[in-house]
Amino acid sequence: MTAARQMTVTGDETKESAAIEQEPIAVRPDPGGAERRTPPGRSKDREPEPEELRADCIADSAGGLTFDLTAPQDAPAAWSAALVLRLRGDGAGDGEVRLPLGPNGAGRLRAVLPSTVALAEGRWNAYADLGDGRDPRRLLPGVNDLRSLVDRRPLAGIGRLGVRIPYATKFGNLALRSWLRGPHAEAGDIIVAPDGMTVSGRLYGAAPAATGALAEARARRRGESPDGGGPATVTVPLDIEGPEFTFTLPYAELAAHWESGSEPWDLWLRPAEGARPVRIARLLDDVADKKQVFSYPALAVSCPAGQVRVGPYYTLDNDLAVRVAGPDQS
């Protein structure tokens, strides 16, 4: 399918982007070996630059991660050595997790993040504290073995679902994208047609009711619906088969609410009448940022205000959404 046109970033996505950009840049040795100019009054005899540290990552089907590092030759054996994960972004507070980093064969160090350790949703920078008195050093990505994450199928009755995917940041450093959700509605196949989109998926941590289960599209735009009941919402029934669900969302109903610019709608699943809604997202694979990988066409739809373009997309948090954009949005 052809990619949808690039559209204006919404306010909520701008906040997400700001969190992504808040990453300290790792200072690395000059690969050319050029001598740096020594400022006046400072000795040329300075401590050599530490060598780069890379971590190979292996994921298991339960959601755990193993980190393997090559130990620097001059690294002392320290019981306090740890792999350090730090939550990125404003308001991260005490978002730090330390994992014991111990020997794993000749010249190798290993740390394990078990699936049972809760890791808050967000982006986590990875560091190595070798217990040598230096500040923790930023890790670079090595080889990632994420085969167990492809088409991962946890038990449908799991109460809380943890997902961690290692990835390389735009600065070339190692980071983890983490989600912690329960219940969770995993999006599967998405079929786009001129009159709407059909979504199939699987619900974890809750059982959809045979009757009364709904999919909801909620306008993210501030303001109230015409009936004064809060943001505009479009609901459609679910077809249920065990934990599997399918629904078709008509584009015309979304287009009828369009006012101006580019307007996103977030997709939710309500397992039963009166139940707490569950965000629909795609998390159970090895792709950390779906927005850059999964692309769907935005199709022309007529509405009272003229003609708009409507199409699904994944947000920066890998949640499923639909964008309704006017003719002035390119």
Image (cartoon, rainbow, N blue to C red):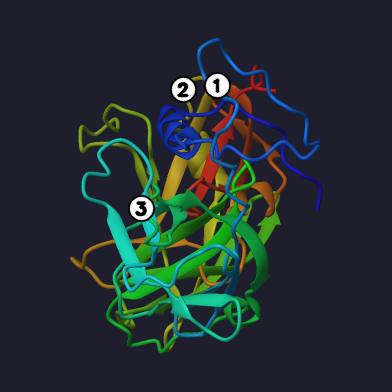
**In this figure, which residue is indicated by the disc labeled 1?**
305
Rendered position, 255 above or below 57? above
**What's the distance in space between the residues labelled 3 and 1, CA to CA?**
65 Å
Q: Left or right: where does residue 201 sit relative to residue 180?
A: right
Q: Secondary structure at mark 1?
A: loop
Identify the residue at image location x=35%, y=57%.
121
Identify the residue at image location x=31%, y=68%.
80
Q: Where, by quadrant of the figure, is residue 203 drawn?
A: bottom left
**In this figure, which residue is indicated by the disc labeled 3?**
133
- Residue 184 x %, y %: 37, 70
Labels in figure, total: 3
The mark found on residue 259 in the picture is 2
Looking at the image, can residue 216 be seen? Answer: no
Q: Left or right: where does residue 275 sit relative to residue 198?
A: left
N-terminal label among 1 and 2: 2
Q: Secondary structure at mark 3?
A: loop
- Residue 312 x %, y %: 59, 48
- Which residue appears farthest toward the top when viewing the image? 40
N-terminal label among 3 and 1: 3
Instruction: Please name the amino acid that badge 3 sits on.
Output: Gly
The front one of 177 and 222 is 177
Rendered position, 295 above or below 261? below
**What's the distance in space between the residues labelled 1 and 2, CA to CA?**
8 Å
The front one of 50 and 219 is 50
